[in-house]
Amino acid sequence: MSRSVEVVPENGLHARPAATFVRTANEFSSDVTVAPDGGESVDATSMIAVTALGVGHGERVTITADGEDEAAAIDALLAVLAEPVE
């Protein structure tokens, strides 16, 4: 299962938003990946991989999850990316 979302945090997937995103991805047993539009997917549980994407505010990413809690994982990660960060 996968869904696409626009990244709302002002700093994109860098530093604090990325840490929250990775921590959330690690709360689920499903295999979770994230990919920028037109880019390759990376392991959503890896801080280095997620920050290396260089995804900025307003860009779209696709989150894919595969496993028993895939729907919950995607919903939680979409919520992280929908919240503006101070």
Image: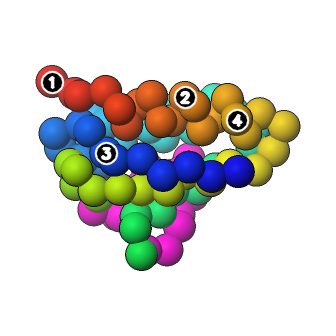
Of badges 3 and 1, the one in the foreground is 3
Q: Secondary structure at mark 4?
A: helix
Of badges 2 and 1, the one in the foreground is 2
Q: Which residue is mark 2?
A: 76
The x, y position of residue 76, in whole percent, is: 55, 29
Q: Quadrant of the C terminus?
A: top left
* Tag 1: amino acid: Glu
Question: Residue 86 bears which disc, if any?
Answer: 1
Q: Are marks 2 and 4 in contact (CB under 8 Å)?
A: no
Q: Secondary structure at mark 1?
A: loop
Q: Earlier in the sequence, mark 1 or mark 4?
A: 4
The residue carrying pointer 1 sits among few (fewer than 14), some (14 to 19) or many (20 or more) residues within 10 Å by Cα, namely: few
* Residue 5 drawn in magenta: no
Question: Residue 71 bears which disc, if any?
Answer: 4
- The answer to whether residue 48 of the structure is visible from this angle is no
* Residue 49 drawn in magenta: yes
